[in-house]
Image (cartoon, rainbow, N blue to C red):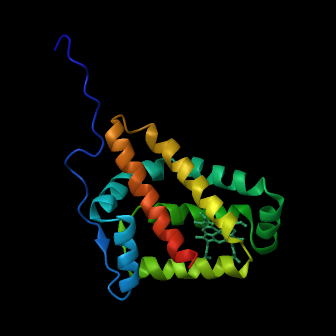
Amino acid sequence: MFGRTKQPHLFFGDDLPQDVKIDLSKHPKLKKQLEMIGLDFEDLKRIKKLQPIVEDNIEFIVTRFYEKITAQPNLLSIIEEHSSIERLKNTLTRHVKEMFRGQLDEDYYEKRLRIAHVHVRIGLETEWYMSAFQDLLNSLVNVIKQQIDDSKELVEAIQSISRLLNFEQQIVLE
Ligand code: HEM
């Protein structure tokens, strides 16, 4: 109608996916950590809804991730000693897609413990691990801000992703 400002298209709307899960009953402390950072079902529903966007942009996210890492000579030499960029691009692609499944369960936890051990074994220092997580968050925000018009929804999406990445760091860095 004339004179009315156009409403932004809502990304999340009312039809959020319902097939999300938090099943960490064997780990009461983790449940408390979730409460502390406010990561709940609503976050996981948003995360799950964002999964297709992440999948569509996974090449950009992963390419940028390794551009940043390989710009640091110390990190590049760890990679060359233990693996290869091509191999790691494949594992990170799988990993990031899975992050957005919206399922925090035993399988999720066990995988992260394994990944943590791998990074301890290669001697990756905590500060670089955390820097890489922040870089991942930067890329994810760049990608989703192209798709979400409504500023309230964009803030909610960024909060949910940030909580998810923080929770993963709590597991892999403990
Ligand atoms: C392996 C994720 C940061 C170097 C892996 C694997 C995953 C992963 C999923 C495969 C683990 C497996 O084989 O089960 C991540 C995530 C990071 C991160 C999510 C941070 C957001 C880094 C950084 C380096 C690095 C900063 C820099 C050196 C490696 C290497 C391996 C590896 C060399 C292979 C180790 C081996 O197979 O012996 N990473 N990584 N990662 N990552 Fe990372």
In the displayed structure image, the side of residue 68 where residue 113 appears, left or right: left
Identify the image quadrant of residue 123: bottom right
Position in image of residue 162 (x %, y %): 46, 57
In the rendered image, the quadrant that contains the C terminus is bottom right
Q: Position of residue 37 (x, y in %)?
A: 39, 65
Give whichever of 151, 113 is nearer the camera: 151
The answer to whether residue 99 is above or below residue 104 is: above
The residue lying at 21 percent from left, 50 percent from top is 15
Q: Residue at x 25, y 19 (%)?
A: 5
Could you tell me how many numbered marks the image carries? 0
Q: Position of residue 100 (x, y in %)?
A: 42, 61
Most foreground residue, 29 or 86: 29
Residue farthest along the top direction in this orientation: 2
The residue shown at (57%, 82%) is 114
Name the image quarter holding residue 172: bottom right
Q: Is residue 75 left or right of residue 140?
A: right
In the depicted view, which residue is nearer to us: 126 or 92?
Answer: 126
Query: Which corner quadrant of the figure contains ligand 1?
Result: bottom right
The one of 151 and 62 positioned closer to us in this rendering: 151
Task: Return the residue found at the far left.
Answer: 1
Residue 34's spot in the image, x, y percent? 37, 71
Residue lying at 52% horizontally and 66% vertically, measured from the top left: 95
Q: Residue furthest front?
A: 36
Of the 4 image quadrants, the one containing the N terminus is top left
Above or below residue 111? Residue 85 is above
Q: Is residue 136 left or right of residue 151?
A: right
